[in-house]
């Protein structure tokens, strides 16, 4: 794709030349996210400031059939923000304002490039709670969360991003600007375009403003780390906790290597782990009444003590809690710093977790790869990191994709699906046939066509190369 001087001049006219970049360094910077080591630089990076400018850019892209990729904070793990056909990289970074925290209605109106944690802290100052908390919350943006329907540790009790999105301002690929719904908690008015946009990975429109619902702030929590001698028993304990009548506010699984590598990555955090321990569950309950929380924590202890566990660690202070959460949230970075890896984001009904874990290990043994699993076990959402270690390049290129296909086939056979929260993007798209029939994929393709007949917006994502 060539960006001609004429197109560049038009982009300069739309947003001003200070916000149009064609130098290699900037293009490379916006050409990668957190997905493996992929780099796909766009030909030009633009940084519009408002929906009108996005609209003019998309009209131009349609006129010249230029692939255009919305770019958030680039923390994505499925390659969604990569400009695989070059063209225009549409960085949303100037959409960085919280426009209104509506304390009367418990809502917030926010632009798409506000950092998730900044939003969570701003509403917390007003006594309000925005629960979705991806482990990347310190760097990812709320627009990227909406585009990926991001989850996080608290999803198990409070739901994922989609559960908080009421209304969206979206620039459609043809440049029209619409609001998708209404700022109401209920809405049965026509097709639900708001939820169609959520999780559409930048392929149907560019999200510029988001209206989200909030909850009242929750004031207390109890956090415990439970070491299991057998990883499969940790997975079995997950559904047992719910069956005992408790809904934890977080229920996270970490395999042994995940903990070891994370502790090595964070030398300031110290947790003693006996050599025989295979996995941990990090369990939190929250609420406003400490006595009730203690009763719930005791119930959880009664459940997990039926399994082979070592001594439970209770986080007594805020510092201890922060250290345990830091440990959990830095697993992905720690694994990345240890070896080349591929991350798959499997999800199954939670009772099937033990079968998923043991199946993954069998598939790894068959194809000669090691995996490190961790994730939001309460949601049945297991991140599978496949480690290159000393595997040959040849086996890495040939055997691993076969193994990944088998992992997804297993996931779907357990009534699960390919991605719980990271999206399909570039790296999972050629596995979509496992989860969906041709009819289903064609329906999705026709929806894409209605929104984007020239296929200019984030082409090459979600849909398999052939189906
Ligand atoms: C260490 C680490 C931990 C993580 N933990 C979690 C986790 O717990 N839960 C979870 O769900 N994810 C997690 N992620 C993945 C990632 O942070 C999320 O997918 C996040 O939602 C991506 O947001 P972003 O702003 O970085 O978007 P990007 O990566 O820049 O983009 C993601 C997709 O959204 C599209 N997009 C971005 N902004 C817009 C917009 N304004 N309009 C339309 N489309 C847009 C892009 O085109 C792309 O397809 C983690 C990532 C890392 C690196």
Image: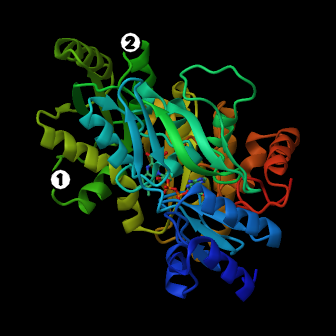
* Residue nearest the observer in this picture, 157 or 430: 157
Using the numbered discs, state the Cα–Cα distance from disc 1 to disc 2 in whole angstroms.
32 Å
Q: Residue 316, how many percent across, how many down?
A: 12, 33
Residue drawn at x 55%, y 58% is 50
Residue drawn at x 23%, y 59% is 266
Q: Name the quadrant containing residue 430.
A: bottom right
Instruction: Give neighbour class at mark 2: few <14, some 14-19, many 20+ (Cα, 10 Å).
Output: few
224, above or below 67, in the image: above
**Mark 1 or mark 2: whose residue is earlier in sequence:** 2
* Residue nearest the observer in this picture, 179 or 277: 179
Q: Name the quadrant containing residue 195.
A: top right
Answer with left or right where residue 444 lies relative to residue 92.
right
Residue drawn at x 86%, y 45% is 446
List the residue tagged with mark 2. 244
Q: Residue 82, how many percent across, how many down?
A: 61, 67
List the residue tagged with mark 1. 269
Residue drawn at x 23%, y 31% is 223
Instruction: Judge whether residue 195 can be spotted in this image.
Output: yes
Q: Residue furthest left?
A: 317
Answer with left or right where residue 133 lies relative to residue 144.
left
Instruction: Give neighbour class at mark 1: few <14, some 14-19, many 20+ (Cα, 10 Å).
Output: some
Element at label 2? loop
180, above or below 323, in the image: above
Q: Residue 137, how many percent across, how many down?
A: 38, 49
């Amino acid at each position: 794709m060539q960006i001609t001087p004429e197109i560049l001049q038009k982009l300069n006219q739309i947003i001003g030349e200070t916000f149009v970049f064609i130098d290699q360094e900037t293009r490379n910077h916006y050409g990668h996210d957190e997905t493996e080591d992929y780099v796909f630089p766009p030909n030009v990076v633009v940084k519009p400031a408002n929906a009108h400018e996005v609209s003019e850019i998309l009209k131009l892209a349609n006129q010249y059939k230029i692939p255009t990729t919305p770019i958030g904070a680039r923390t994505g793990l499925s390659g969604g923000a990569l400009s695989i056909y070059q063209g225009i990289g549409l960085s949303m970074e100037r959409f960085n304002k919280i426009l209104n925290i509506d304390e009367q209605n418990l809502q917030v109106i926010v632009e798409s490039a506000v950092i998730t944690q900044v939003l969570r802290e701003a509403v917390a100052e007003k006594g309000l709670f925005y629960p979705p908390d991806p482990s990347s919350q310190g760097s990812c943006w709320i627009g990227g969360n909406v585009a990926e329907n991001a989850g996080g540790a608290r999803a198990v009790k409070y739901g994922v991003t989609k559960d908080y999105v009421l209304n969206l301002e979206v620039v459609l690929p043809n440049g029209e600007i619409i609001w998708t719904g209404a700022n109401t908690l209920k809405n049965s008015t026509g097709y639900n375009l708001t939820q169609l946009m959520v999780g559409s990975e930048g392929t149907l429109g560019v999200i510029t403003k988001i209206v989200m619902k909030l909850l009242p702030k929750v004031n207390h929590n109890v956090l415990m780390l439970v070491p299991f001698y057998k990883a499969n028993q940790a997975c079995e304990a997950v559904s047992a906790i719910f069956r005992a009548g408790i809904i934890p506010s977080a229920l996270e699984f970490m395999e042994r290597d995940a903990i070891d590598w994370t502790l090595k990555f964070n030398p300031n955090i110290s947790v003693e782990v006996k050599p025989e321990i295979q996995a941990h569950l990090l369990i939190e309950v929250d609420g406003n009444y400490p006595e009730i929380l203690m009763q719930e924590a005791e119930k959880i202890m009664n459940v997990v003590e039926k399994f082979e566990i070592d001594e439970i660690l209770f986080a007594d202070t805020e510092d201890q809690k922060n250290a345990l959460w830091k440990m959990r949230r830095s697993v992905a970075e720690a694994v990345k710093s240890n070896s080349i890896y591929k991350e798959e984001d499997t999800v199954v009904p939670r009772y099937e977790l033990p079968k998923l874990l043991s199946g993954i290990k069998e598939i790894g043994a068959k194809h000669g790869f090691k995996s490190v699993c961790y994730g939001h076990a309460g949601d049945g959402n297991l991140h599978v990191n496949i480690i290159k270690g000393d595997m040959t390049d040849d086996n890495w290129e040939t055997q691993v994709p076969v193994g990944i296909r088998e992992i997804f086939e297993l996931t779907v056979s357990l009534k699960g699906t390919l991605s719980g929260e990271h999206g399909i993007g570039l790296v999972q798209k050629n596995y979509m046939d496992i989860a969906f029939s041709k009819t289903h994929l064609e329906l999705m393709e026709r929806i894409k066509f209605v929104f984007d007949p020239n296929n200019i917006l984030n082409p090459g994502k979600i849909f398999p190369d052939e189906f």
